[in-house]
């Protein structure tokens, strides 16, 4: 199973992000756009895992303590690719988020995960292989500025069902104050 650890968004933030995805879709000649239910912030991508690794990921998540914090999604941009760009919504600099992500990496490595060493650049993927329509360009694309409290993180499974990418929460860890989302 393909796994990652993420912050999932509440309905309000997901709705605001979906409006940006819809506008991006209208201004593009091609692309694969993130479905509303799949909008999330990845903390750590684990890749293909077996049952033992899934249990190890759960133990690593349990070992990370964090206080609730506010996550702000703002602005947008793209990573240039030959076959079309990856468009994303940005995440404001946040020490609590950075510390949570770094602590997760340490705990996951301690239980045997071999993780990428590149610097964490938090973003929300809006779409892949996107080519903007040259007649509309990116001028006037909707920006985004939304926030939500983060009280829990989730272990997610990524799978194709009926040809569509579906993300399913498998396990959740709540903040140190015990707040339930």
Image: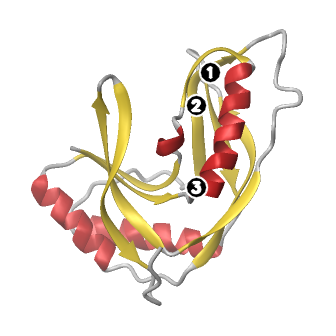
Q: Which mark is residue 11?
A: 3
Q: Is residue 10 above or below residue 75?
A: below
For mark 2, give the secondary structure: strand
Q: Which mark is residue 75?
A: none
Q: Residue at 23% of width from left, 73% of height from top?
A: 59
Q: Residue at 55% of width from left, 80% of height from top?
A: 68
Image quadrant where one finds the N terminus: top left
Q: Position of residue 169 (x, y in %)?
A: 33, 56
Specify whether 106 is left or right of 130. left
Specify whether 64 is left or right of 18. left
Distance between the alpha carbons at the discs numbered 1 and 2: 7 Å
Q: Residue furthest bottom?
A: 177
User: Given this view, does label 1 or label 3 mark the residue nearer the observer?
Assistant: 3
Distance between the alpha carbons at the discs numbered 3 and 2: 19 Å
Does the CB distance between marks 1 and 2 fall below 8 Å? yes
Q: Residue furthest right?
A: 140
């Amino acid at each position: 199973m393909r796994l990652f650890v993420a912050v999932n968004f509440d309905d309000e933030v997901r709705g605001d992000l979906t409006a940006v995805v819809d506008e991006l879709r209208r201004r593009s000649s091609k692309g694969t756009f993130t479905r509303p239910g799949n909008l999330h912030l990845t903390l750590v991508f684990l890749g293909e895992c077996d049952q033992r690794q899934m249990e190890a990921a759960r133990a690593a998540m349990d070992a990370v303590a964090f206080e609730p914090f506010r996550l702000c999604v703002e602005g947008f941009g793209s990573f240039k690719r030959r076959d079309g760009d990856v468009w994303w919504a940005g995440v404001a600099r946040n020490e609590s988020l950075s510390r949570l992500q770094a602590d997760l990496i340490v705990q996951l490595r301690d239980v045997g995960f071999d993780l990428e060493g590149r610097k964490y650049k938090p973003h929300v993927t809006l779409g892949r292989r996107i080519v903007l329509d040259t007649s509309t360009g990116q001028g006037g694309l909707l920006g985004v500025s939304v926030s939500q409290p983060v009280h829990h993180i989730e272990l997610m499974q990524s799978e194709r069902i009926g040809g569509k990418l579906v993300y399913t929460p498998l396990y959740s860890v709540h903040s140190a104050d015990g707040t339930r989302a």
